[in-house]
Amino acid sequence: MDKVKLTIDGREVEVPKGTNIVEAAKLIGVDIPTLCYHPDLDVRANCRVCLVEVEGSRTLQAACAQPATAI
């Protein structure tokens, strides 16, 4: 399985390709608040509580719907 290495708050993490940012952050103990996200449900990204800054993106992204990508 392909892996993606990324940095969250200055900490590196390697996750399977397709993992969203919320789940990647959990692996290194970084809590991204959410209201509408649950790993067993379809992602809707309705509440926008989990907005994060993604390097190279012009706008904030919903961490529950944004797949982790390498920089």
Image: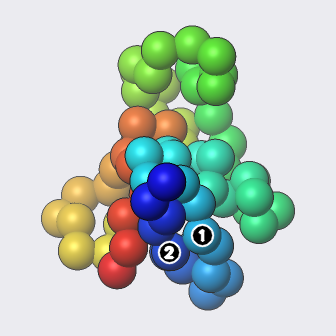
Residue to which mark 1 is pinned: 14
Instruction: Residue 44: give x, y in percent of width and height.
Output: 40, 19
Image height of 68 relative to 37, above or below: below
Q: Is residue 35 visible?
A: no
Image height of 58 relative to 24, above or below: below
Q: Nearer the viewer, residue 34 or 16?
A: 16
Instruction: Residue 51: give x, y in percent of width and height.
Output: 45, 48
Q: Residue at x 63, y 34 (%)?
A: 34
Instruction: Residue 22: give x, y in percent of width and height.
Output: 59, 47
Q: Residue at x 62, y 81 (%)?
A: 12
Residue to which mark 2 is pinned: 6
Residue sitting at the far right: 29
Instruction: Residue 14: give x, y in percent of width and height.
Output: 60, 70
Q: Residue at x 40, y 37 (%)?
A: 65
Q: Is residue 67 left or right of residue 27?
A: left
Image height of 43 relative to 56, above or below: above
How far apart are labels 2 and 1 at the CA level? 6 Å
Residue sitting at the far front: 1
